[in-house]
Image: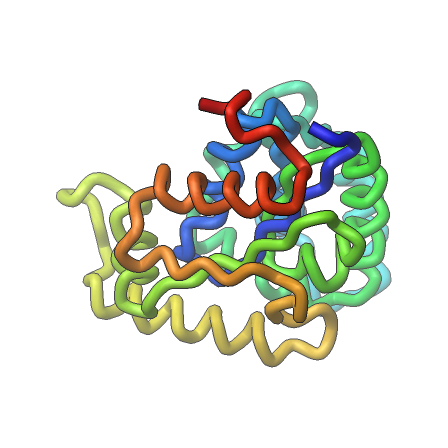
Amino acid sequence: MKRPLQIAVDGPAGSGKGTAASMLGKVLKLPVLDTGLLYRFVAWRAMESRVDLNNTDAFLSFVSLALKTMSWRTEGVFFDGKDCTSLLRGEDVGAVASKVASMPAVREALLQMQQTLAIQGCVMDGRDIGTVVLPEAQVKFFLTASLRERGRRRWLQLTPLAQRKQSLEQMIKEVALRDQRDSERTLAPLKQAEDAIVIDSTTLRQDEVVDRMLRVLKRRDLIELDEYR
């Protein structure tokens, strides 16, 4: 591998980008950084502390303090030394995180953190990695899938079947609304980079997606593929 190798993995909710990035990072022995967790962390702490997102000055001061209590590691996000990643995955946190992500000052603070951590090489996934966070990444992937398949995946991720409060159709509608918010926001919208490799994962297994990624890296002479078999 030619280091430092930066790989950007973008895509909408439910496209499989997180799982693919994690698997790819393990194969290449690179840190895997999920930028969405940072926004979810800020949203989670704001919800826990009952901070008013509409009070911009107060919220920005809160964000500054919140970031000092967290650490972003390959295995997830830690708050006061404890892994809080599982607490950040809920749809309620995701809805607030989407609002947080639309705030320019918050994005600027987190952008600097993301770019600093990426210097030593990483696989980074999110919704604006190839266009904003790592525009100079050697390889950019944009994962997608049909709306129904992405909604189904999100629905299956939530809770055991007996505890699900939403129907599959409701989840599909929520994913569609999330797509709209992320694509239409003024700052760093969800957008495919012009030089990104698009992978439609609708009918692919995760290992098949990763295999395609590895072949792209091989074609660009960034890795020796045989080393990862």
Position of the N terminus by quadrant? top right
Colour convention: rainbow
Image position, residue 187 (x, y; %): 74, 72
Q: Is residue 155 left or right of residue 188?
A: left
Position of the C terminus by quadrant? top left
Total labels: the figure holds: 0
Q: Is residue 139 left or right of residue 204?
A: right
Image position, residue 181 (x, y; %): 54, 75
Which of 78/21 is in front? 21
**Residue 18 drawn above or below residue 179:** above
Q: Quadrant of residue 207?
A: top left
Q: Is residue 129 left or right of residue 201?
A: right
Question: Which residue is found at the position 34% from the left and 60% from the top?
Answer: 150
Visible in this render: residue 49? Answer: no
Q: Residue furthest left?
A: 162
Question: Which residue is found at the position 55% from the left and 47% from the top?
Answer: 216
Q: Is residue 8 left or right of residue 202?
A: right
Image position, residue 2 (x, y; %): 75, 31
Question: Which residue is found at the position 73% from the left and 36% from the top?
Answer: 5
Visible in this render: residue 60? Answer: yes
**Residue 206 drawn above or below residue 23:** below
**Residue 67 drawn above or below residue 105:** above
Image position, residue 112 (x, y; %): 85, 48
